[in-house]
Amino acid sequence: MLSEIEPYTDFYVWENGTYDEATGKHLPPNNWVCSFRYSAWEWNDQRQQFYLHQFGTFQPDLNYRNPAVHDAMNKVMRFWLDKGIGGFRIDALPFMYEVAKDPKTG
């Protein structure tokens, strides 16, 4: 997740946010909250950016605007279809795409 190695650099949703010099804290790019009612953004010291998680911090959001993510997910789905599964449960579809700065309140 943290690697800035192509093609994985943008596999997840990353944003810079802002820095509050008065408090010395990094502030998220917007005020979105995750399903668990705390910030949907988590600061990462290694990348010096926030990543989006609409659920737990251990579940970073994939960046479906990245064509490489589409390709990777198609390969995963093809793998399981070739194994003979009957379908996929896609219950979090409304959470697949987001625009970090529009609207500010999510």
Image (spheres, grey):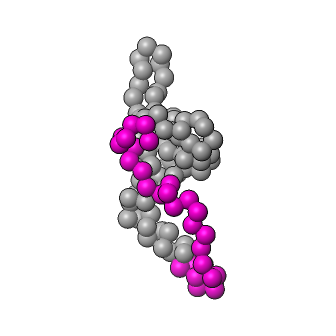
Q: Please state the horizontal and vertical placement of residue 27, each as a whole percent of the image.
A: 45, 28
Q: Nearer the viewer, residue 106 or 69?
A: 106
Question: Does residue 49 appear anywhere in the picture?
Answer: no
**In the displayed image of the protein, which residue is found farthest to the top?**
22
Q: Please state the horizontal and vertical placement of residue 8, each as a whole percent of the image.
A: 45, 57
Whether 91 is among the magenta residues is yes
Position above or below: 10 against 71: above
Whether 37 is among the magenta residues is no
The range drawn in magenta is 78-106
**Residue at image point 63% right, 86% down:** 84
**Residue at image point 50% right, 69% down:** 73
**Residue at image point 48% right, 23% down:** 25
Q: Quadrant of the C terminus?
A: top left
Position above or below: 71 against 22: below
Q: Please state the horizontal and vertical placement of residue 54, each as a whole percent of the image.
A: 54, 47
Position above or below: 22 against 32: above
**In the displayed image of the protein, which residue is found farthest to the left?**
102
Q: Nearer the viewer, residue 65 or 86?
A: 86
Q: Nearer the viewer, residue 24 or 6?
A: 24
Query: For residue 49, which quarter of the picture?
Result: top left
Position above or below: 59 against 24: below
Query: For residue 20, which quarter of the picture?
Result: top left
**Residue at image point 56% right, 59% down:** 92
Question: Does residue 70 appear anywhere in the picture?
Answer: yes
Magenta span dominant secondary structure: loop
Q: Please state the horizontal and vertical placement of residue 56, each as a whole percent of the image.
A: 62, 45
